[in-house]
Image (cartoon, rainbow, N blue to C red):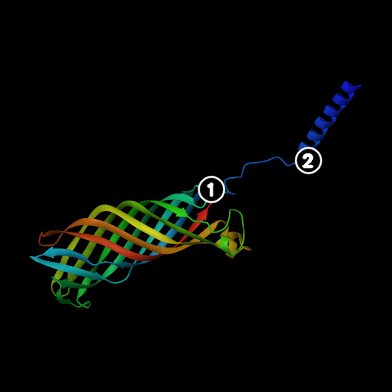
Amino acid sequence: MNRLLFAALISTSLVSAASAADMVAPMTPPSASDNGMGFYIGSLSSVNFLKHTNFDIAGVNVNTKYDTGYYSAIRAGYNFGSYGYVAPRVELEVGYGSASVDEHRVSGFGGVGSIDSYGDVNTIQGFLNGYLDIPLAPNGETGVLSVFTPYVGGGIGAMNVKLRKQGIGGVGTLINDNDTAFAYHLDAGVGINLQSVFSGSSIFEKTTLDIGYRFTAADSLKFTARDGSSSNTDFSSNAVTIGLRKQF
């Protein structure tokens, strides 16, 4: 009798466990989209404030000041999704920038006014970028914190800088040359989740608006003036950036 009771208890327990297992939904791993992973494409534009450049000609050094410039780029990247408190992503960026000459000054003394100075500085830039997004809200949570995601990062690559037809009225073009050098930039800003802001519109699904600051630099660029004089100068700029990213 005891053996029969024990067998009955075992059978009842197994049946109950099987029934409970059938009632529990199967566990599935989170999808890539739930974790924020995926490829994206986007654009980037900025208002640039350039540092002065220099070149030598006829035994004197000419210091060039620029008006406010611009930079426009396209980019494509991959978001690796959330890893604890950060979400890393990498991207490729190619862009073009330009600024007009404000004035040339000779060896730091006085100078030629902007009305008599002309020319531009043009850049073609290419970078491999890396960023860390810092989500303020847990993954999947909605609310104000889910709208804003700070980010930090930067990139390394190359930059071609052209001092295009820079000269002085009544004298002529002093330099028209270009050079390519290693370049880098450092960034910080905030991404705004437009899908959360415009929740009723499918146009902004998985779309982020980036607003930030960027410092860009390329060192030891070599230029040759019209008289054959060679000189080195550095290029750098501070910029306010705005961009869009669309993830797939």
For the residue carrying disc 2, how many other residues have a C-alpha within 10 Å: few (<14), some (14-19), or many (20+)? few
Q: Position of residue 85 (x, y in %)?
A: 51, 52
Residue at the extreme right of the image, as rendered: 1
Residue at image x 46%, y 50%? 89
Q: Which mark is residue 37?
A: 1
Residue 185 placement (x, y as % from top left): 34, 57
Q: Residue at x 25, y 53 (%)?
A: 180
Q: Secondary structure at mark 1?
A: loop
Residue 27 relative to residue 4: left or right: left
Where residue 67 sits, quadrant-wise, is: bottom left
Q: On residue 243, which mark appears?
A: none
User: Image point 62% across, 59% down: which residue?
Assistant: 142
Cα distance in 3D space between marks 2 and 1: 31 Å
Residue 44 located left or right of residue 100: right
Measured as percent of width and height from the top left, residue 126 is found at 34, 53
Query: How far across and down, in percent of the image, does residue 21 sit?
Result: 76, 37
CB-based contact (under 8 Å), mark 2 and mark 1 = no
Q: 84 and 198: which one is in front?
A: 84
Residue ID for mark 2: 23
